[in-house]
């Protein structure tokens, strides 16, 4: 008796079969669409401010479009199976940020698109260079886990540097978060520390997941961890408090602790870790309110900014007026007065966008962030290894948490924290670090979406027909 295994004739020698779709052309079309939106916005800004449209309004958006095409080519050749939606969303956000920063510069100087707008374009070029370098050197995200403790050490050192530097080399607006080089500029090392620490967290939690998943007792339907397993979360909590005390920055402290707790939850699937994290956060926040004067000031401004409208509450009051002026549809690009808000191009750029594009425009911007975070979570579900799942989940959550914290502060939902808005706020450190974050997310997405057959030898992709005698 014989049986035929397989179906159809054997493929020709050396044939690789049909190549799976990479969706890169979809990404290209979306990047071009994003560039078109930025171009239209730039033209609208000049028409509103100068009452005329000149060729000058085309320089910056066309330059941005060229930079984003370079980013697309990097993904096309270095991560061809990555999610095709993430990069266009990032490009649109980055372009909106540069355009509104340039719009604020036009209100202050006479020459078109000089000042912060052009500087942010140069920072975008540097950020895309970093993005391409990460994709080039990190060909497999799993290689990062081999250097997990090195990344952890680098992250801790980067966080500590501003705390130990003299105030004149590290303090801006009351927060010791910077490395200031007189005559050159400043860099915020904590933005890069965030990436290094997420790599360490992912590797550590994969290694310790089984231990951290153990439960000691069940209370009100929740499985509590063993007491001796509380060490990591308590250590992360204490470290975040040290950041708050020595660097006087509530937002960075919240970011580090929140990312660790959520990654711990993803690794163990234990709700108890979330509850413990929330409890420790509440205790730390109350203690900081009582001990750290900067936190107490932020809380008092949040509770009643109009009581200090001519003092510390002026910034938040102006932001609320700007958002209220924008209404549903906004005053129009270039037609508002967002420059009346201090730090309108950095901490309060959300207020700038809300005033001139309205609730619908601001909602569209928040939707872009939501899409990026959702696609990052999708990448964590698609990838097969535990390290990649945790890393992508942490990267996606960090974007969502940062946006929630800054938008909540600007809109008076929660106290102001001083975090930057990813891809929108003026500054090079945040922009470069977040583009590197997106590169890692795309690398994980590429691994998760890449068909298994692509990595197989040609002779194993197509099993030849053969006769088996039974």
Image (tube, rainbow, N blue to C red):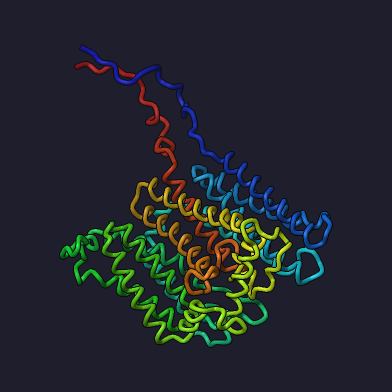
Q: Is residue 232 left or right of residue 133?
A: left
Q: Can residue 138 be seen by looking at this rendering?
A: no
Q: Can residue 319 be seen by looking at this rendering?
A: yes
In terms of depth relative to the viewer, which is nearer, 47 or 143?
A: 47
Q: Is residue 311 left or right of residue 16?
A: right
**Image point 45% across, 51% down: which residue?**
374
Numbered label tally = 0
The image quarter containing residue 255 is bottom left
Considering every residue shown, the one lying at the far left of the view is: 217
Indicate the quadrant containing the C terminus: top left, top right, bottom left or bottom right.
top left
Considering every residue shown, the one lying at the far top of the view is: 1
x, y (%) of residue 188?
54, 73
Instruction: Examine the rendered structure and indicate whether residue 182 appears above or below residue 424.
Output: below
x, y (%) of residue 64?
68, 55
**Image point 46% across, 73% down: which residue?**
252
Instruction: Examine the rendered structure and indicate whether residue 300 appears above or below residue 4.
Output: below
x, y (%) of residue 311?
60, 84
The image quarter containing residue 355 is bottom right
**Image point 47% across, 29% down: which residue?**
16
Indicate the quadrant containing the N terminus: top left, top right, bottom left or bottom right.
top left
The image quarter containing residue 145 is bottom left
Q: Is residue 90 left or right of residue 382?
A: right
**Image point 53% across, 50% down: which residue?**
86
x, y (%) of residue 245?
43, 83
Q: Is residue 236 left or right of residue 324?
A: left
In terms of depth relative to the viewer, which is nearer, 213 or 289?
A: 289
In terms of depth relative to the viewer, which is nearer, 325 or 467?
A: 325
């Amino acid at each position: 008796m014989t049986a035929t295994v397989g179906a159809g004739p054997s493929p020709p020698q050396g044939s690789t079969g049909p190549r799976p779709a990479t969706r890169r052309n979809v990404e290209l079309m979306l990047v071009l669409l994003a560039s078109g939106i930025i171009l239209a916005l730039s033209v609208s800004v000049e028409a509103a401010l100068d009452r005329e449209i000149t060729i000058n309004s085309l320089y910056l958006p066309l330059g941005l479009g060229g930079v984003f095409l370079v980013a697309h080519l990097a993904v096309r050749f270095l991560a061809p199976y990555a999610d095709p939606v993430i990069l266009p969303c990032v490009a649109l956000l980055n372009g909106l940020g540069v355009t509104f920063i340039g719009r604020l510069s036009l209100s202050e100087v006479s020459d078109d698109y000089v000042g912060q707008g052009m500087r942010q374009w140069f920072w975008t070029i540097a950020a895309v260079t970093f993005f391409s370098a990460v994709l080039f050197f990190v060909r497999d995200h799993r290689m990062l886990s081999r250097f997990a403790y090195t990344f952890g050490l680098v992250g801790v050192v980067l966080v500590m540097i501003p705390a130990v530097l003299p105030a004149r080399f590290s303090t801006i607006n009351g927060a010791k978060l910077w490395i200031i080089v007189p005559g050159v500029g400043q860099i915020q090392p904590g933005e890069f520390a965030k990436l290094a620490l997420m790599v360490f967290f992912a590797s550590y939690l994969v290694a310790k997941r089984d231990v951290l998943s153990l439960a000691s007792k069940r209370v009100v339907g929740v499985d509590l961890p063993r007491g001796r397993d509380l060490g990591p979360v308590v250590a992360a909590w204490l470290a975040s408090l040290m950041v708050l005390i020595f660097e006087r920055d509530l937002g960075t402290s919240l970011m580090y602790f929140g990312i660790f707790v959520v990654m711990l939850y993803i690794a163990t699937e234990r709700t108890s870790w979330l509850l413990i994290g929330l409890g420790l956060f509440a205790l730390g926040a109350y203690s900081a309110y009582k001990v750290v004067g900067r936190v107490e000031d932020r809380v008092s401004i949040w509770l009643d900014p109009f009581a200090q409208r001519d003092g510390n509450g002026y910034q938040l009051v102006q932001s609320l007026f700007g958002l209220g002026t924008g209404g549903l549809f906004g005053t129009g690009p270039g037609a508002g007065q967002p420059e009346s808000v201090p730090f309108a191009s950095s901490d309060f750029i959300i207020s700038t966008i809300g005033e001139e594009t309205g609730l619908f425009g601001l909602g569209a911007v928040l939707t872009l962030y939501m899409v990026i975070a959702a696609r990052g979570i999708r990448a964590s579900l698609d990838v097969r290894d535990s390290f990649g799942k945790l890393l992508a989940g942490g990267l996606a959550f960090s974007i969502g948490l940062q946006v929630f914290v800054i938008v909540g502060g600007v809109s008076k939902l929660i106290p102001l924290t001083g975090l930057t808005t990813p891809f929108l706020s003026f500054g090079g450190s945040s922009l470069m670090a977040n583009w590197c974050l997106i590169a890692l997310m795309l690398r994980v997405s590429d691994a998760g979406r890449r068909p298994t057959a692509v990595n197989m030898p040609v002779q194993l992709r197509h099993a030849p027909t053969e006769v088996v005698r039974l």
